[in-house]
Image (cartoon, grey):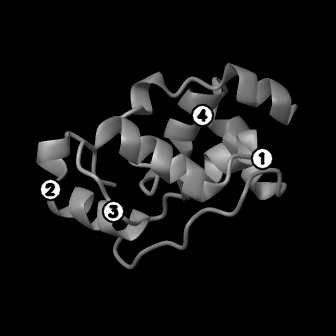
């Protein structure tokens, strides 16, 4: 696994409206990285990927990674910068903090046409 090659070939086109504080599953991550579900599962078990988010009660047994964590891992972009890039691209109101933008997106997800995860 070559992280630089994965970063160069990562295709976020199907997930551009996914909030950076949202999550992607193992299968979605495989789609983004252009590899198989099994490769992602193996990389996770071998410790090559960042740790997934803790599983929520009643959330099933799927591993989920925050979009910002994956982008940070691939490109080295700080999470705050990743969040602000999403906010400035997909949310038209001026926000003073990332928390305020997250709160707004979670409450008004239909208005902003972002996916909830």
Circle 1 residue: 43
Give the SS element for disc 3.
Answer: helix
Label 2 – label 3 distance at C-alpha: 10 Å
- Graded by Cα atoms within 10 Å as few (under 14), some (14 to 19) or many (20 or more), the crowding at tag 4 reads some
Q: In the orientation shown, which residue stands out farthest toward the right?
A: 2
Please report whichever mark, 4 or 3, sits nearer to the chain's N-terminal start: 4
Q: Earlier in the sequence, mark 1 or mark 2?
A: 1
How many residues crowd around disc 1 within 10 Å: few (fewer than 14), some, or many (20 or more)?
few
The residue under label 4 is 30
Q: Nearer the viewer, residue 46 or 21?
A: 21
Would you say 1 lies left or right of 52 here?
Answer: right
Q: Are marks 4 and 3 in contact (CB under 8 Å)?
A: no
Q: Residue at x 19, y 43 (%)?
A: 112
Sequence-wise, the earlier of marks 2 and 3 is 3
Identity of the residue drawn at 63% across and 23% down: 34
Residue 88 figure quarter: top left
Mark 1–mark 3 CB contact (< 8 Å): no
Q: Which residue is mark 3?
A: 102
Residue underneath mark 2: 108
Crowding at label 2, few (<14), some or many (≥20) Cα neighbours within 10 Å?
Answer: few
- 32 vs 58: above or below: above
């Amino acid at each position: 696994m070559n992280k630089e090659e994965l970063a160069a070939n990562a295709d976020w086109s199907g997930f551009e409206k996914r909030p950076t504080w949202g999550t992607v599953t193992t299968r979605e991550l495989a789609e983004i990285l252009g590899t198989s579900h099994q490769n992602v599962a193996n990389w996770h078990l071998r410790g090559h990927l960042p740790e997934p988010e803790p599983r929520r009660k009643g959330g099933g047994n799927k591993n989920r990674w925050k979009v910002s964590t994956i982008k940070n891992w691939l490109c080295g972009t700080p999470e705050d910068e990743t969040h602000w890039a999403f906010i400035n691209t997909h949310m038209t109101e001026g926000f003073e903090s990332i928390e305020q933008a997250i709160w707004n997106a979670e409450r008004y997800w239909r208005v902003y046409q972002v996916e909830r995860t």
